[in-house]
Image (cartoon, rainbow, N blue to C red):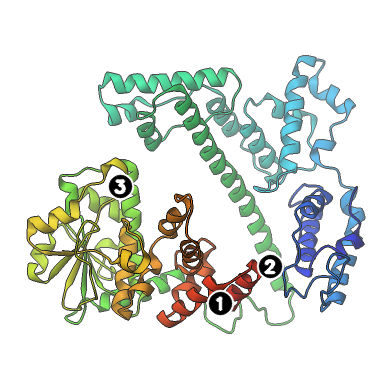
Amino acid sequence: MQPTIMGLASQFSQRKVKTFLDIFLRTERGLIHRTPYLLVNRTLKTETKPRPGDKSVFTSKSSPDINIKSKSETEKLLNKLKSLKGSVSEKLRLSETMTPELEQLVLENQPNRSFLLRQALVEIKGAEDRTKHLLSLPESLTVDEWRTLISLQDYRSRLTYLQSIYLGKDCLDEIRKQDEIYSGPLQISEEMISELVGDDKDERRKIKIFQGHHEMLRQEGQLLPSSVTEKNLTDILHLTGTSRIKKYLSFMFKTEISQFNEGLRKAENAKRTEEMKKIAKEKKANANHIVYGLGENVIMHRISDSTMNSFFNWIAVREFHEWGIPLVIDMSHHKSWKMDRSSKKSLFTELSNSISINRMYKTPFQLHITGLQEEHMESLKKIVPSVNEPDAAFNATSQNHLDLFPAEKMVYLSPDSNNDLQKFNPDDIYVIGGIIDKGNDRLPLTLSAAKRLRIRHARFPMRQHLGLTGDLNVDSCVAIMNDLKASQDWFYSFRWVPSRHLGNRVKTNLNPSLQHQLAYRAHRHLTPNSWKGETESVRNLNLGPAQYRMYYQKIKDCKTREELDELLEELKI
């Protein structure tokens, strides 16, 4: 049964009513094609109880003690919904426009094509009922457009064609070419294969086996990926067994369909942006007063990303003087130790994060990335284009760190060392190993390098302050050292330890202690690497040592979920 408009009043807060108003308005304007009541029904099924302190919810039988603060404004919204109800409910969706008479015209007395038409209608209905990756569809199709639609083999081509009609684009030839790729056998260029495996017959046989599995599943009518990247091809060479091949094909398809949906969304947003610009331009032309907003009259100046980037870079560049304290990331290990593609990508992502984290502090380190080979320098340029610019926030060089700084001042940070680093010494130069250690490939490279070069070595005292040990990412080490330099507080500095280390201690133990569980809860809510989003990350980053310790203990002391939510509400920026 469809919920009534006034029924919404007893179920939803003012915020949710506004959300539904937006859905109705977008539906009325043709921005999305979906039955609004379907969304209402789905939300009613999953509606949670009002949170304590939420005073913007209507009083109902289930919540008799909730105050009514903004009833008049919410009633206005409900009246607007009621006025829209008639116009929206009368509008047919595209899947509902197919009549028996229209079906006969589309099929042209060829009943064997009825299956293709049914399949297209199922896909259209699925697109209309989406809860994410919303897709705008045309209100109706001509007979020729229906015939063109069912002539396409792959459903991705059909969705692209429907969107092109809605957007008014004439790109049928391109869609047909892509449809041949979607529906045909998996093609892997000889150039890509030669570059990766050369003339190795065993490796080429693995690729042929993978293509064979793809073809068999394609003949069965399963949805499969249509292209292969270099990374995919590298992973394919390590697959053993039919089950793993099928799972990897499923993974590739999910990745490809996600990119496909993103492409549809961007195309639709581009048109919507043009329409909004046109409306704004007309509004400005007809305005009899000063126009306010971005790009118009505003109280504050708009600061661009490039301005912010230059500001943070200058903070880091400023430290490249005699008063600055060097911090080294040593990349020389890779001259004798080779990484696979995924590890290399992870490492350079960590380097990029290290540069960003370091320059956020008021007095960052002089960051030196040493021992870079030519191929590593090229990879670094891809993620940090300003690597060779005068205002770069770091120094990237092929020189060894021993060529830049005296060995007697250096301390190599290694998780394999038996020496705990008790405190930060501004006269020492700390070295972090630029490596990725995981799985069976883990080697004590940093400790052996320190002993070979006859320089001091130490480890973070994680067991002493957190009760655990672990190998940390390069960017986590850089962040910890920055906090330690500023506060000389190890417990506070270890807020950068990824929450998974504390979580694994709880999850892998059959009977985890209560203290470990509480420590994990407090740490994951206060780490700057927050899983909740950017707002929480910035909030946690701005906490000082005393605040961090206070809220850490308060979160551990919370007895109920409501008490925890109320405490986290205090922390909001």
Give the alpha-carbon distance from disc 2 to disc 3, as whole Å. 47 Å
In the picture, residue 490 is in which quadrant? Answer: bottom left
Q: Which mark is residue 280?
A: 2
**Kind of residue at disc 3:** Lys
User: Which comes sooner in the sequence, label 3 or label 1?
Assistant: 3
Please state the horizontal and vertical placement of residue 420, each as a whole percent of the image: 22, 67
Q: Tell me: residue 304, above or below residue 208.
A: below
Marks 1 and 2 close (CB-CB < 8 Å): no
Q: Residues within 10 Å of mark 2 (few under 14, many from 20)?
A: few
**Residue closest to the eye, 463 or 194:** 463
Q: Tell me: residue 534, above or below residue 364.
A: above
**Residue closest to the eye, 559 or 91:** 559
User: Which comes sooner in the sequence, label 2 or label 3?
Assistant: 2
| SS assignment at label 3 | helix
Q: Tell me: residue 469, above or below residue 283.
A: above
Marks 2 and 3 close (CB-CB < 8 Å): no
Q: Along the horizontal axis of the image, is 317 left or right of 95?
A: left
Please state the horizontal and vertical placement of residue 465, each as a whole percent of the image: 34, 69
Residue at 42%, 73% in the rendered image: 308
Give the alpha-carbon distance from disc 3 to disc 1, as whole Å. 37 Å
Q: Which mark is residue 344?
A: 3
Q: Residues within 10 Å of mark 3 (few under 14, many from 20)?
A: some
Please state the horizontal and vertical placement of residue 233, each as a whole percent of the image: 38, 31
Q: Which mark is residue 383?
A: none
Q: Which mark is residue 571?
A: 1
Q: Along the horizontal axis of the image, is 212 left or right of 474?
A: right
Quarter of the image that includes the C terminus: bottom right
| SS assignment at label 1 | loop
